[in-house]
Amino acid sequence: MQNMVDGVLYKNTVKTLTAVAESINLDKDVLVRLLKPRRAFIVSVPVRMDDHSIQVFDGYRVQHNQTLGPCKGGIRYHPSVNMTEVAALAMLMTFKNALLHLPLGGAKGGVCVDPSKLSETEMQGLTRRYTTEIHPFIGPERDIPAPDVGTSPQTMAWIMDTYSQKEGFSIPGVVTGKPLEIGGSLGRVSATGLGSIYALRAACEKTDRSLEGMKIAIQGFGNVGSHAAMSAHERGAKIVAVSDVIGGIHNSNGLDIPKLVEHYEKNRSLSDFPDTETLSNADLLELKCDALLPAALDSVIHEENADKIKAEIIVEGANGPVTGAADKILSENGKLIIPDILANGGGVIVSYFEWVQGLAAFFWTEEEVNHRLHSIITNAFDRVWSFSQSQKCTMRDAAMAVALRRLEAAMQLRGLYPR
Ligand code: NAD
């Protein structure tokens, strides 16, 4: 696991963990165990391409900690996926699940691949072979994958089918984020974006602001970004800019989000949307607005641009969008950051609901799902807010501290096997 020490996200996560552990005097035995993942797998994923050649991709799955329950975490298909990144994301999942009081541990997986370059047949081949390679280590009681960047409900359907074929019967509980027809949950697709807006609204309530009329810029118009945009728009906020990998669009009076969603679904592009100016991803981050919601990739706010961020509130829709150095600058500039393990917790919360509904074979309405999502995320927000106010620390450190206290108690109760 030596190569893990190179990645920015991994370094930042370990640095925050170590600093917060010291500040709350976390049990040293707990800390040394949390600094390393429990298991990390690298697998080769050979795929028969459409031209009949074989390409071999690198696949990963890291199970960081299982103290609170089965491991849980997404699967990412992206060219930047590597062991370091997957390990950091798995670690963040452990803290996120602990913070949200979910009975789940932390994991993450991925394949180093550019999914836009694969045909559907190649994607299916890649997914089924990756599932075969990690099959011995996943399952409803062991480790339950979900979608992340570059994967979708269809990917989860292929994983569920491959796993079920190997076991000989249908096992929907092996993944979450499935299509509704095969045991998915209502509200799962919108959960992360909606949850991030529930968290932003909770922050508004604590700081005498109103979500209504608030100007928000969103980087990334995929699952998280588009649903955050829609949820905020429905609650009266003005989405002044959005972007995808190509670039962004801007209108200081607010974009018509329902029409934009339609436009994007039809054209797979933000360009040519009426009454907008184009702007780069870098400019979007520095736009004059009340709240900024990075919902694409990690480390997009760093030492060089942190000082130029004008938004008062930063909602981390993506995992790790603010580097450690940027975090310090933003906090010194008085910005309120709602950290990823809280702000984007909606996805894993409704994934947990999907797993529970699947095990019970009894499904809830979308209203029930959203009501329970709201309750879990606002309760977690309150815990983090209270800690940060009483200890005079940032929301990021507070979120980590609250999660660590819960893990510490559970790890001490379970003890160390064999002794
Ligand atoms: P997605 O693949 O649906 O969307 C990603 C978006 O980011 C797309 O609009 C893409 O065009 C854009 N993008 C990609 N590269 C970019 C770049 N270099 N610059 C700017 N934009 C770029 O992914 P998603 O599921 O929305 O996930 C986004 C982030 O949220 C990731 O960090 C992911 O780990 C995190 N997250 C997702 C969920 C979930 O439920 N989907 C849950 C928790 C956290």
Image: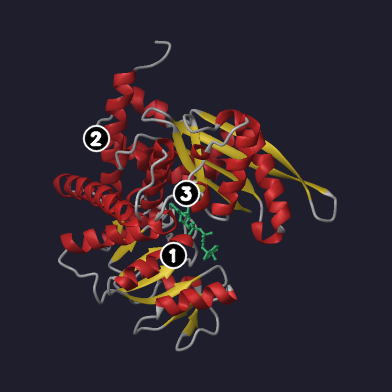
Q: Distance between the residues labelled 1 and 3?
A: 21 Å
Q: How far apart are marks 3 and 2 (CA)?
A: 39 Å
Q: Which of 50 and 290 is in front in this view?
A: 50
Q: Name the residue under label 2.
A: 24
Q: Which residue lies furthest to the right in this view?
A: 52
Applied colour scheme: secondary structure
Q: Name the residue under label 1.
A: 225
Is label 1 or label 2 in front? 1
Quadrant (top left, top right, bottom left, bottom right) of the C terminus: top left
Q: How crowded is mark 3: few (under 14 residues within 10 Å), some or many (20 or more)?
A: many
Q: Which residue is drawn at 36% across and 81% down?
A: 254
Q: Name the residue under label 3.
A: 184
Q: How crowded is mark 1: few (under 14 residues within 10 Å), some or many (20 or more)?
A: many
Q: Residue at x 46, y 86 (%)?
A: 276
Instruction: State the SS at label 2.
Output: loop
Q: Residue at x 39, y 30 (%)?
A: 69
x%, y% of residue 87?
51, 39
Q: What residue type is labelled 1?
A: Gly
Instruction: State the SS at label 3.
Output: loop
x%, y% of residue 279?
49, 79
Quadrant (top left, top right, bottom left, bottom right) of the N terminus: top right
User: Upstream in the sequence, badge 1 or badge 2?
Assistant: 2
Q: Residue at x 41, y 54 (%)?
A: 186
Q: What residue type is labelled 2?
A: Ile
Above or below, 94 relative to 12: above
Instruction: State the SS at label 1.
Output: helix
